[in-house]
Amino acid sequence: MTGVNGIGPRLDRLATADNLQKAGRQFEAVFTGMMLKSMRQAKLAEPLFDSKAVDTFREMQDARLAETMAEHQPMGIGKAMTEFLARGRSTLQADVNPPASDPPA
């Protein structure tokens, strides 16, 4: 079932801690990659060798570096996101499965 915007609730992806950990690592890698890209755009000097091939190679190198950093030396933003999603998971599950109330007397 999808919502008004066409995006379904997909609570099954939040079902396990392993999925949350994986999402946290991926978020950390994306965030780190964006940070590296911004740093590269703030050129402090003209490069000696500048070409489209060198730019493409740097982008691939930065993407791999971001993944490695997220896996081995995380900044902590992925962990914060994982904890946030874990709290949201318990709230969403409580909303989907409200506790049974006692019948009126």
Image (cartoon, rainbow, N blue to C red):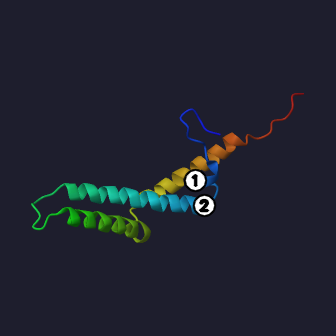
Instruction: Judge left or right: residue 51 versus residue 94.
Output: left
* Disc 2 residue type (three-letter): Ala
Secondary structure beneath label 1: helix
Q: Which residue is the site of mark 1?
A: 86
- Look at the image and tell me in which quarter the N terminus lies: top right
Where is residue 10 shown, x and y percent of the image? 61, 47
Classed neighbour count for the residue bearing mark 1: other residues with Cα under 10 Å, few (<14), some (14–19), many (≥20)? some
Which residue is drawn at the image coordinates 11% and 64% (left, top)?
A: 47
Where is residue 48 shown, x and y percent of the image? 9, 67
9 or 84: nearer the viewer: 9
**Does residue 76 appear anywhere in the picture?**
no
Which residue is drawn at the image coordinates 44% and 57% (left, top)?
A: 27
- Report, in whole angstroms, how far the alpha carbon at label 1 lies from the one at label 2: 8 Å
Which residue is drawn at the image coordinates 36% and 68% (left, top)?
A: 64
Where is residue 4 shown, x and y percent of the image? 57, 32
> Is the residue 97 above or below the residue 22 in the image?
above
Secondary structure beneath label 2: helix
Q: Which residue is the site of mark 2?
A: 17
- Asked if the residue under mark 2 is in contact with the one under mark 1, i.e. CB atoms within 8 Å, the reply is yes
* Disc 1 residue type (three-letter): Ala
Classed neighbour count for the residue bearing mark 2: other residues with Cα under 10 Å, few (<14), some (14–19), many (≥20)? few
